[in-house]
Image: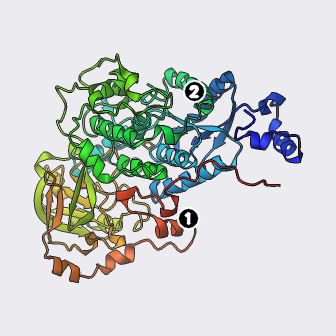
Amino acid sequence: MAGSRSAQWYAGNDRNGYIHRAWMRRGLPSDAFDGRPHIAIANTASDLTPCNMHLNEVAEHVKRGMWEAGGVPLNLPVVSLGETNVRPTAMLWRNMAAMAIEEMLRANPIDGVVLLGGCDKTIPALLMAAASVDLPAVVVPGGPMLTGHFRGAALGCGTDVWKLSEEVRAGTLSGEEFLRSESSMIRSKGHCNTMGTASTMGLLAEVLGMTLPGLAGTPAPDSRLLEGAHETGRLIVGMIAAERRPSTVLTRGSFLNAIVALAALGGSTNAVVHLLAIAGRLGVELTQDDFDRIGSGVPLLVDLQPAGRHLMDDLYRAGGLHAVLHQVRDLLDPKAITVTGRPLVDQFQNVTIHDPEVIRTRDEPLQQDAGIAVLYGNLAPDGAVIKPAAASPHLLKHRGPAVVFDSVEDLHARIDDVDVTPDSVLILRGCGPKGYPGMPEVSNMPLPPKLLAQGVRDMVRICDGRMSGTAYGTVVLHVAPEAAAGGPLGLVRTGDMIILDVENRRLDVDVPAEELAAREPSPEMTAAFARPERGWQRLYVETVRQADTGADLDFLVGSSGDHVARESH
Ligand code: FES
Ligand code: MG
């Protein structure tokens, strides 16, 4: 193995070989440098990413497997993102984390990497980085937390925060009770237990072929996660010997498999931007329209919040991801392989559904056509997305007057006494990648209290931002181009009639083209757009692409491979 990547640092008895070995020894025996693989554990554990706090323990078990199989494990703490803490939105830093991780993997003497992630943006950032370096790589998803309960009922992370806070706004729950529920929600280590973005991306990492088979969805406190971590440590050593890289595993077929699974699972809309961004790193042709074309005819089989009732622990108990994939096996690409080198479809031959309340069969789906619909029209020339499974059926075809908010601050200032009817369409703009900046999860706008008091629980809402994967409602998201990039969403005025027609995939404002073209963007909106003068945020705003292609930075699209740079001394 003298030709391995790390050997380009450690082999040879010259001055530089001496330096590289000497500083790394620290207890490593000499044969650690005999050409055996040196493997990074890209670890997003951080006390400020509470969903990933337990990953240091997971890393210890990955190390055991690596030692056992003849590798040298190296913990590499990487940029981490805590979804609930990081402002203005963790999404603003996804590309930065991906860039930093990519560069550190390439700059260091390593032959492969195990990726430890969990909270929403961490697995996407790790996969984007791994794709652009293209060293052998495998994910250990940190797993969801256990179900917490309040007043005898299960609490879903995120989803029940939205529900309970609407109850407070509607006057049906006291503020005191609301606060009492707070300490019950996060019961254990792990990420959100709804089918939000973290659960979705952990499961899709496996569908893409990037995890040990059967590992995704294992709850964070479950011993089987540590067992899987140990086995993953062994697996990566074999992958390096076989030179099995992300570019061999992540084919167009594996992305289409992920789209099928996304629909059957009722997964997060955020998966659209993340999968597009990962594919962009590999040069795999994948478009937003693929999500609609492939996903829309797939039945929803998993009854998890926010689209349904149960939580991740229930899904695991009911048979997990494999039981779901087994139901849609005929829709999956049989040629797509996983990190094991074997086809994904071979990994769930004999699986059963243990609880048909949680995982439905193909004959009795929760909904016949799930997936994500991509809308076009004079409001979204480059598209917008909606998740019909999380929307109200009666609103999927709707015509109503716009009530426009020029910023999130404007929304919060006016929503409590704005002039609306249940037919009104709430529009929020300035929340795209450039405008906010970072495309935050603000699209599921709170409903006006006056309508809540009348029993209204959903309205059509349209925004150029994203929505939490744990949220629900008839919300049109990811409108492209965003208002800050000159999109027509910035030209709508309160009172304009908006036409939503999900069946025909249309999103329009009923204003003649000439009149719309002659309008000036509202000065209040323009004033609220982000204008960062320096640093990462400036680079981001100047180079970020729109949601329809994954909101990556234009110069980060593609791969630079794992080449070894010139000497440092
Ligand atoms: Fe981390 Fe939800 S906040 S996964
Ligand atoms: Mg989120």
Position of residue 54 measured from the top left corner of the image (x, y, whole percent): 56, 34
- Total numbered circles: 2
Q: Quadrant of residue 402?
A: bottom left
Position of residue 219 measured from the top left corner of the image (x, y, whole percent): 45, 28
Residue at which label 2 appears? 235
- The residue sitting at 13% across, 51% down in the picture is 503
Few, some or many C-alpha atoms within 10 Å of disc 2 (few <14, some 14-19, many ≥20)? Answer: many
In space, the residues marked 2 and 1 are separated at their CA atoms by 36 Å
Q: In this image, 530 relative to 373: left or right?
A: right
Residue at which label 1 appears? 536
Q: Quadrant of residue 409?
A: bottom left
Q: Nearer the viewer, residue 174 or 325?
A: 325
Q: How is the image coloured?
A: rainbow
Position of residue 160 measured from the top left corner of the image (x, y, whole percent): 31, 41
**Which disc number belongs to residue 64?**
none
| Secondary structure type for disc 2 | helix
